[in-house]
Image: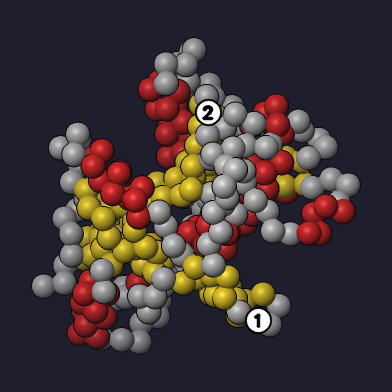
Amino acid sequence: MTETTVYSGNGLVHIKNPHLDSMEEDILYHLNLGTKTHNLPAMFGDIKFACIGGSPNRMKAFAQFMHKELGLKGDGEDLADICAGTDRYVMYRAGPVLSISHGMGIPSISIMLHELIKLLHYAKCQDVTIIRIGTSGGLGIKPGTVVITDTAVDSSFKPRFEQVVLDDVVVRSTELDKDLAKELLACSKEIPDFPTLIGHTMCTYDFYEGQGRLDGALCSFSSEKKLEYLKRAYNAGVRNIEMESTAFAALCGLCGLKAFILKTNILISISIS
């Protein structure tokens, strides 16, 4: 079964689950929020941007940076964690910007996105852009290069996210807004200290074997086979590798959210020469 991206014409965030209509209250467990416990439209109704990244500390620092950049009152040092009642994720607010952690890997970001998307829907937010920021491993590019993702691909370099639902394999589109990617690239020309390019982002299910690393507890391939695979990835348009992008692109697209991914390649930059 294949599901494709659906973009909304009215700017609302869509949820595609009829079972939610019959629930007396929807508890967003991992965000420590609820539809009856909290007035979500009052708390979040004017949100326009949701910026997400793996690390709790980085997302707090990003929220403080945005607080300063937006000229909000105070120094931002005492921003409150909206999800303080749980130890799964953190969420901070700076004006119309939410800054949220998602942990590592598809399962972790998927849980957070399900609840974030429902939060934005219940809050009646409109024209929200969701932005994934952070670091990744570069492929054939200089360390420090920022990659703007035009397409999220799986380990076979295909633009798809496969989700097992009960015993069905559901294939979801990982389409992202290519015009937005070009617009971001144009904006990057104003910041010469950050080399920026557009490319495919490959999403794997594992940090070690899945990304061709030779230093995990298990390794069943040679360094020559690793290099051959990475060359094929590069020739297919892949410029960075991480573990969340396909799930991110699929969920956001199906729920009518404009989304893009910006990753700075500072962890590693693999040479394919």
Q: Quadrant of residue 238?
A: bottom left
Of the 4 image quadrants, the one containing the C terminus is bottom left
- The image shows residue 180 at horizontal and vertical percentages of 36, 47
Name the residue located 37 percent from the left edge and 63 percent from the top edge: 151
- The image shows residue 26 at horizontal and vertical percentages of 79, 47
For numbered disc 2, what is the local secondary structure? loop
For numbered disc 1, what is the local secondary structure? strand
Q: Is residue 56 left or right of residue 169?
A: left
- Farthest residue to the left: give it: 273
Above or below, comparing residue 186 to residue 71 in the picture: below
Badge 1 amino acid: Asp
Question: Could you tell which of marks 1 and 2 lies nearer the N-terminus?
Answer: 2
Q: Which residue is mark 2?
A: 96
Name the residue located 48 percent from the left edge and 13 percent from the top edge: 74
For residue 168, which numbered disc appears in the image?
Answer: 1
- The image shows residue 51 at horizontal and vertical percentages of 47, 41
Name the residue located 21 percent from the left edge and 74 percent from the top edge: 235
- Farthest residue to the front: give it: 9
Q: Is residue 26 left or right of residue 3?
A: right
For residue 180, which numbered disc appears in the image?
Answer: none
- Depth order, front residue of 193/256: 256
Q: Is residue 123 left or right of residue 219?
A: right
Name the residue located 67 percent from the left edge and 37 percent from the top edge: 124
Instruction: Count neighbours of disc 1 (C-alpha within 10 A) and say few if under 14, some if 14 to 19, many if 20 or more.
Output: few
Mark 1–mark 2 contact, CB under 8 Å? no
> Which color scheme does this rendered protein use?
secondary structure
- The image shows residue 134 at horizontal and vertical percentages of 38, 48
Badge 2 amino acid: Pro
Of the 4 image quadrants, the one containing the N terminus is bottom right
